[in-house]
Image (cartoon, helix red, strand yellow):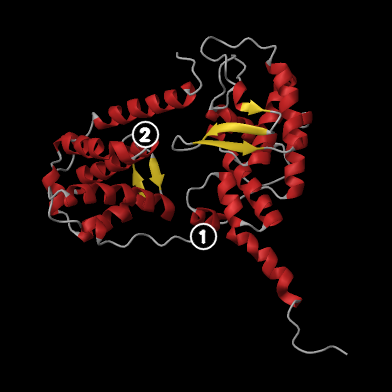
Amino acid sequence: MPNDANTYYEEVSRQMIKEQRKILEQLPKFVTEFFRGIDATTAPRTRVGYARDIKLFLYFLSKTHPDYKDKKLKDIPLSLLDELQPADIEEYMEFLKLYTDEEGNEISNSEYGIKRKMSALRVMYQYFYSRERIHNNPASIVNMPKLHRREIVRFDENEMYDFLDKVEMGTNLTSRQLASHEKTKKRDLAMMTLLLGTGMRVSECVGLNIDDVDINSASLRIIRKGGNVDIVYFGYEVEDKLLEYMDERDEIVALEGHEKALFLSSQKKRISVRAVEKMVEKYSRITDTTKHITPHKLRSTYGTQLYRETGDIYLVADVLGHKDVNTTTKHYATVSQDKKQNARNKVKLRDNE
C-alpha cells in the first residue's frame, strides 16, 4: 500500500471506482456509456451512488414492464427509456416508497431518499436526451417530491458535556469495554473533542496524517469532500486533547503503509470511518440522551453552536466547508427560532406607566 500524504483519499477513490465497475458489470452497455460521459465532472462517490440508483430503476423495470419482466438487467435496451411515459416514472416513485430488493429485504425510502434516486435518473435521461440518443425525457416532466424540513438532531450543551465526560471516564461501560477503554481513551477523547470542536466530517478526521497537525498555528490541513485542501483551526480544548494523544501516538509503531496516519485502530492501522461511527454509538448509548447520535450529528452540534455564538451564516458555511451557503442556511436557520423567541418583547405597543 503506498504511503504518501494522500494515500487515504486515493485508496478511498480506488475502492469507489472498483465498486462502480462491479455494479456496471450487471447493467446494460448504455449505462456504462453514461458513466464514461460523466466521469470528468463527478466524484467517484457520487458515481457509485448514481450506479446503485440506476441499477434500482432497471430492477424496477425488470419487475414491472411486461416486455422485460424477470429478464436480466443487461437485456434492457436504451430504447425502453424512450418509450416510457411520465406515468411510468410516477409509478417508479411510488415503488420507491416501499419495495422488496433482490435479496428479499423490505426497503422503504423517505422523501429525501426518493428525491436522490430521482436525481440520478434525471441526470441519465438528460445525458442521452441532450445527445439526441433518445427523444423523450419523461423524468424531467414529473414533479419531484416535496421535501419537509427535517429537525436537526444535535446535542444540547448538557448532553455534549456528559458525552465527553463519558468518553473520558468510561462511566457505565461494561467491564469488557472498560478494559479496552483504558488503552484507547486518549485517542477516543481526542477524536470526539476534535469532531465536536471543529465540525469536520468523519472522513476528514480519519484521513488526517501526523504532519497535518500544526500546533503552533492551532490548525489542521484536511482534504475536503471533493478533494480540495483546506485549513481548519481548533481551540484550546481540542489542542489539549490532541497533544495528550499525540504524545501517546509517538510511542506506537504503526503497520507498514499506515505510519503517517494520526489516528490508529487497535490493529495499528489507520482507523476507519465505520470504527468511528461505532465509537460514537458506544459513547452516545451511555450518555444521558434519547437522541440517535452519529458523527454527522457531532458536526451539526458544532455548526449550531458556532451559528448561535456568531450569527454569521457565511462564517459557518466556510468553517464547515459548504460550497453553497444555501446548504448551511437550510440546516442551521432553524436556530433563529431562539432569536425570534427572545424578540417577542422587543417591540413596545404602548407605554406602560
The local crowd at label 1, few if under 14, some if 14 to 19, many if 20 or more residues have their Cα within 10 Å, is few
Q: Nearer the viewer, residue 274 or 123?
A: 123
Which element type, helix, strand or loop, lies under badge 1?
loop
Judge whether residue 87 can be spotted in this image. yes
Residue at 66% across, 12% down = 252
Residue at 25% across, 62% down = 141
Identified by mark 1, the residue type is Arg
First along the sequence among labels 1 and 2: 2
Judge whether residue 177 can be spotted in this image. no
The answer to whether 167 appears left or right of 151 in the picture is right
Which residue in the structure is indicated by mark 1? 149
Question: How far from the left and from the top, in percent, is residue 224?
Answer: 50, 37
- Residue 24, located in which quarter of the rendered image? top left
Question: How far from the left and from the top, in percent, is residue 137?
Answer: 19, 56
Which residue in the structure is indicated by mark 2? 44
Question: How far from the left and from the top, in percent, is residue 165?
Answer: 78, 35
For the C terminus, the quadrant is bottom right
Question: How far from the left and from the top, in percent, is residue 26?
Answer: 23, 31
The answer to whether 328 appears left or right of 186 in the picture is left
Residue at 23% across, 51% down = 126
The Cα atoms of the two marked residues, 1 and 2, are separated by 28 Å
Residue at 65% across, 46% down = 302
The local crowd at label 2, few if under 14, some if 14 to 19, many if 20 or more residues have their Cα within 10 Å, is many
Q: Nearer the viewer, residue 12 or 167?
A: 12
